């Protein structure tokens, strides 16, 4: 006597796989919708592209910045973010709310133990004159225009991944005849809850010929 149990079981597994795939896509879309999508980012012009590396020309960027106190990112990340978040939510001389942008920039001092976290100010705020910070250790800053070599990497923002990406970028800079000017800067586009495979992380190094 024939039975249709194996056939039913196979169909059930197929539908479970389809439903699981839809749920994964929905979660991925939700993660992106709550991360970098819809946020203003600095405009730049790509001069050269090779794999995960781009040579970009950035305009001057107005930022609000604070010292994190740890170039290795093991401490100070939350405190730095909290101070800058306070600024954009009204802790400034005009009690003005400022829109969040991407990426969060972290400028690490060359050979030092300090790092500076930056929120790039929206263009309309920068053009109108950004309100003066009132929070402790928060200041307005200008990142000057110029050419930057940039490498993108995905996944966790741990020291090992950052060190590997920085080393790869430094090799690319040398092999293409550029001269690095200053230390590496990190750019994080997504909040910590964004799935690892969707995160956009970058290392930037200012370069000159």
Image (tube, rainbow, N blue to C red):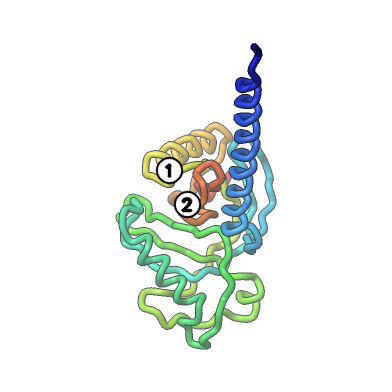
Quarter in which the C terminus is drawn? top right
Residue at the location (40% across, 79% down)? 135
Q: Quadrant of residue 8?
A: top right
Give the residue drawn at x 63%, y 48%: 26
The residues bearing labels 2 and 1 have C-alpha atoms spaced at a distance of 8 Å
Residue 36 x, y percent position in the rendering: 59, 57
Q: Is residue 88 above or below residue 44?
A: below
Query: Which SS class for mark 1?
Result: helix
**Front-most of residues 28 and 48:** 28
Q: Is residue 12 above or below residue 101?
A: above
> Residue at the location (42% across, 83% down)?
134
Q: Mark 2 points at which residue?
A: 186
Q: Residue 151 carries which label?
A: none
169 versus 42 height, above or below: above
Q: Tell me the residue that label 1 is attached to.
A: 162
N-term-proximal mark, 2 vs 1: 1
Residue 2, how many percent across, how many down? 65, 13
Tags 2 and 1 touching, CB below 8 Å? yes
Q: Tell me what residue is drawn at x 61 percent, y 22 percent.
A: 5
């Amino acid at each position: 006597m024939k039975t249709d149990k194996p056939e039913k079981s196979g169909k059930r597994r197929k539908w479970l796989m389809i439903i699981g795939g839809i749920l994964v896509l929905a979660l991925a879309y939700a993660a992106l919708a709550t991360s970098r999508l819809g946020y203003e980012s600095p405009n730049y012009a790509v001069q050269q592209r090779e794999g995960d590396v781009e040579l970009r020309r950035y305009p001057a960027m107005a930022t609000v910045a604070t010292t994190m106190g740890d170039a290795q990112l093991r401490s100070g990340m939350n405190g730095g973010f909290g101070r800058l978040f306070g600024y954009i939510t009204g802790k400034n001389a005009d009690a003005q709310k400022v829109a969040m942008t991407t990426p969060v920039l972290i400028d690490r001092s060359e050979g030092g133990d300090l790092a500076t976290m930056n929120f790039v100010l929206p263009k309309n705020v920068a053009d109108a004159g950004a309100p003066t910070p009132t929070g402790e250790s928060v200041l307005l800053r200008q990142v000057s225009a110029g050419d930057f070599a940039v490498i993108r990497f995905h996944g966790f923002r741990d020291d090992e991944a950052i060190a590997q990406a920085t080393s790869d970028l430094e090799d690319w800079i040398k092999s293409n005849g550029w001269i690095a000017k200053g230390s590496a800067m990190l750019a994080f586009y997504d909040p910590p809850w964004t799935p690892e495979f969707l995160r956009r992380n970058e290392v930037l190094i200012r370069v000159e010929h």
